[in-house]
Image (tube, grey):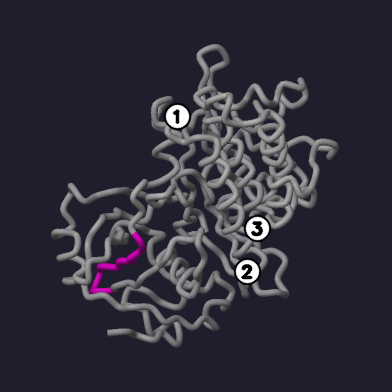
Amino acid sequence: MNFCFSSLNCFFSSSISSENFSDQNDQDSQTFWNIHAFSYDELKIATDGFRSSNKIGEGGFGIVYKGRLRDGRRVAVKTLSVESKQGDKEFMSEIASISNITHPNLVKLHGGCIDGPSKLLVYDYMENNSLAQFLLGGEESRAKLSWKVRREIALGIARALAYIHEEMKPHIVHRDIKLSNILLDQDFTPKVSDFGLSRLFPDNVTHLSTGVAGTLGYLAPEYAISGHLTRKSDVYSFGVLLLEIVSGRTAIDFDLQVGEFFLVEKAWEMYKSNKLVQLVDPTLNKTSFSEREMDRFLRVGLICVQQKCGLRPYMSTAIKMMSGEIDVRNSQIFDPGLITNIMDVKIGNRRSRSSSFTKMSSPRLQRS
């Protein structure tokens, strides 16, 4: 059975109202969807009753389970937590953003289900889980990702962002690019996932003013401080992610000698000292890559996180930089943007009065 969703109201349950979704500036009322409608029982059977042993992930939205449909397809079933205050808007945002998207580096949405309070989305199952599982799993896990694999992962993510930023109409800004939202299939092909915080940008819109949403360590400073959202906000997050992929370190990391530090700040210091290549993950086989290519990728990361958003490249340009079509060796790189205090983050119309970012381990913000 297929449902054609010709307007938002076709997919609203009694607990979701158009008022809940109004901060999309009425963009989504123009969206037309055609996705498969699963029954709750069908997904319950597929996941063995949402058995705990089938749990493969958990986030602010809810729990994700692996399952197998009656036709044999392996899927990931994302459930909306009843307790999630942001869940309704995230649920609708995700459908609005990716229901009609087909791209090799974007997660594929197979359909969804609303059954009373239960709201579920069904995606392709990714055999290698997420990039976070490998880069955050210690040296042994990181060593499983060769430079060749990491290079293709970085380029694949960039292609996905270039597609939603520049080719999709309306454009899409993801707002939560990070390690755990990059899924990997059996061949380690990256798939950008979790569009629950995304926003749609028609051609005539250059920016949106919103409350801040995303994850500490990846937030572009101008967005975190003012709520001024542009496509360059995603570019900043990608820059942080690129530094993570090459270095094997996390956005907010820890060192026994210096304590907790920000990867962006560390990379900038090493760049100024002409030691940028020393940031490369030591688990990588030195014979498997050239220092020149590593230097290029790290420089692109720094170019993407520059404080002035106008200096950051569009993602299509970043791809050319990484591929060597644009020589970045002589490009001037300016100071990176960095939020070091959570008090600087805009929450609604005020500043946060919570403790310093350095006391936190990249929690996700959901303030819009």
The magenta region covers 114-124
Is residue 99 toward the left or the right of residue 169 in the image?
left
Question: What's the residue at 45%, 78% (across, down)?
Answer: 18
Q: Earlier in the sequence, mark 2 or mark 3?
A: 2
Q: Nearer the viewer, mark 2 or mark 3?
A: 2
- Going by the numbered disc 1, the residue's amino acid type is Ala
Q: Earlier in the sequence, mark 1 or mark 2?
A: 1
The answer to whether 227 is drawn above or below residue 291 in the figure is below
- Going by the numbered disc 2, the residue's amino acid type is His
Task: Write down the residue under mark 2.
Answer: 171
Question: What's the residue at 29%, 53% (across, down)?
Answer: 63
Q: Secondary structure at mark 1?
A: loop
What is the x, y in percent for residue 99? 45, 73
Q: Nearer the viewer, mark 3 or mark 1?
A: 1
The answer to whether 138 is drawn above or below residue 324 in the figure is above
What is the x, y in percent for residue 320? 72, 51
Residue 52 is a magenta residue: no
What is the x, y in percent for residue 193? 45, 57
- Going by the numbered disc 3, the residue's amino acid type is Leu
Q: Quarter-wise, where is residue 221 in the image?
A: top right
In the picture, the quarter occupied by the N terminus is bottom left
Q: Quarter-wise, where is residue 131 in the image?
A: top left
Residue 122 is a magenta residue: yes
Question: What's the residue at 48%, 51% (across, down)?
Answer: 190
Task: Write down the residue under mark 1.
Answer: 143
Q: Give the dominant element type of the magenta stretch: helix, strand or loop.
A: strand
Which mark is on residue 229?
3
Q: Give the Cα distance between marks 1 and 2.
A: 36 Å
